[in-house]
Structure formats: structure tokens, C-alpha cells
Image (cartoon, rainbow, N blue to C red):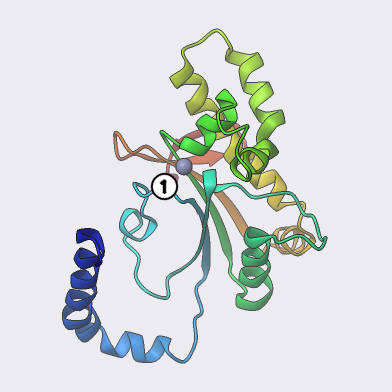
Amino acid sequence: MPSQWIRRFAQGYRSFRQNYFETNRALFKELSDGQAPKVMLVACCDSRVEPAIILDSGPGDLFIVRNIANLIPPYQPDTFHHGTSAALEFAVNSLGVSHIVVMGHAGCGGIRAALTGIGGETEFIGPWVSMIGPVRDEVVQACGGRPEAEQQRMLEQRSIVSSLRNLDSFPFVAEGVKAGTLFVHGWYFDIHTGDLLAYDAEKDAFGPLPF
Ligand SMILES: [Zn+2]
């Protein structure tokens, strides 16, 4: 028997079909011919960070990939299974998005795993977050004596910067950025306050959204 949670979402679907879908029939008809989002978003799997709600977006607006700790891996064209890189390739080369936003968040469990080493014994989480090992070492060195919450916030933000750097290692991204047809952004959502901060490359710091 389905649990109460599955029943809840089955009911949620019925409500969507009767209300949202009916109200937006024209939009869904248009979208059934294909998608043309202008923005790709890389977000965390975390259930508390819901991009569509935080950014007030609708169907067809955002091409989203969610993974543990919203990380962009480095460019590694080999035979392994690269889900995030595949999404990136499709967004840039097939959809022709104009913007890629990496959106991190406060209280990220994946970042905590990278910081504390919890998850080291896992099959996939440890190896996945190990890509920010060098950034973690920098953060620990810079503020190792400070409270763990402060170190975590710093790593949450610096890992976004690291992902932006990794984005640039993909030739098709670097090409678009150089040509001025593709823009990359680092955003940070604070679940507690509701603030959304943006990375300012000139200041090398996060601050209020500049637009
Ligand atoms: Zn997270």
C-alpha cells in the first residue's frame, strides 16, 4: 500500500491537473512543441532549496540539474557516467542557454560532508564531494580556528567559486563566455534569512544581487 506521503503527492498531482494545468493550458500546449529556456541552473538536491519557488519560475523557464552540493565537476571527457556534465553540454550546445547559475545554499549537508570528512566511507558521496578537497583545505587553513558553522558557510560559498572555475574548463563554456554569448553566475541562498546573495568576481565576495 502506498504510504501517506505517496497518497499526498498523488492528491497533489490531481490538484495540479485540475488547477495549474487547466489554467496554463496554452503554455503547456506551446511547451509540448519543445523547450527554449535561456537559463541553466545548477542547484543542490536539498529538499529545502526549491528553485522554482525561490526564483518564482514556471515550466519552460529553467533548465535545472540538481546534485549533491550543487557542484560542477572539472571537464573530464572519458567513458564514466557524467550526469552533470551531460546536462551542461545539452544546455549549452543544444539549447543555447545564455546564462548558467550555480546556486548554493546555507546548511548544505554535502558541503558539511566535505568539511568534516563524514561520508568518507560512502560509495559515492565521499568521492563526489572530494572534488572540492583543495578548496576545503584552503578554507580550513584560512579560518580553521573559527566556529564550524562559519567554516561551513565559507566553504559553501568558496565551492561555488570553484564550480565557476570548473565551468570554465569546459571548452564549449569557455568559448561562449569569451564570445560574450554566455554568462556564468554564482548565487547563495540562505535558508534561515531568505537572502539570496550573488558572487562579485571583482570583489571576490558574495553580496546582494546587483540587479
Ligand atoms: Zn546542499
Q: Is residue 197 above or below residue 58?
A: above
**Residue drawn where x is 53% and y is 47% of the image:** 68
State the residue lying farthest toward the front: 1
**Disc 1 crowd, CA 10 A, few/some/many (<14, 14-19, 20+):** some
- Residue 134 vs residue 201: left or right? right
In the figure, residue 195 lies in which quadrant?
Answer: top left
Q: Residue 151 versus residue 208: which sits nearer the camera?
A: 151
Q: Where residue 121 appears, x then y in whole percent?
A: 62, 33
Check disc 1 and give the amino acid type: Asp
Q: Where residue 71 appears, x then y in whole percent?
A: 60, 47
Q: Is residue 130 above or below residue 78?
A: above
Mark 1 — residue? 46
- For the N terminus, the quadrant is bottom left
**Residue drawn where x is 17% and y is 75% of the image:** 15
* Helix, strand or loop under label 1: loop
Q: Is residue 34 above or below residue 75?
A: below
State the residue lying farthest toward the right: 78
Q: Where residue 102 appears, x then y in whole percent?
A: 54, 50
Query: Does the rendering let one see residue 205?
Result: no
Asked whether mark 1 lies closer than 8 Å to ligand 1, one says yes
Q: Where residue 164 appears, x then y in whole percent?
A: 65, 46
**Residue drawn where x is 76% and y is 60% of the image:** 80
Query: Does the rendering let one see residue 120?
Result: yes
- In the rendered picture of this protein, how many numbered marks are placed on residues? 1
State the residue lying farthest toward the top: 145
In the figure, residue 24 lies in which quadrant?
Answer: bottom left
**Residue drawn where x is 41% and y is 33% of the image:** 107
Q: Is residue 202 above or below residue 90?
A: above
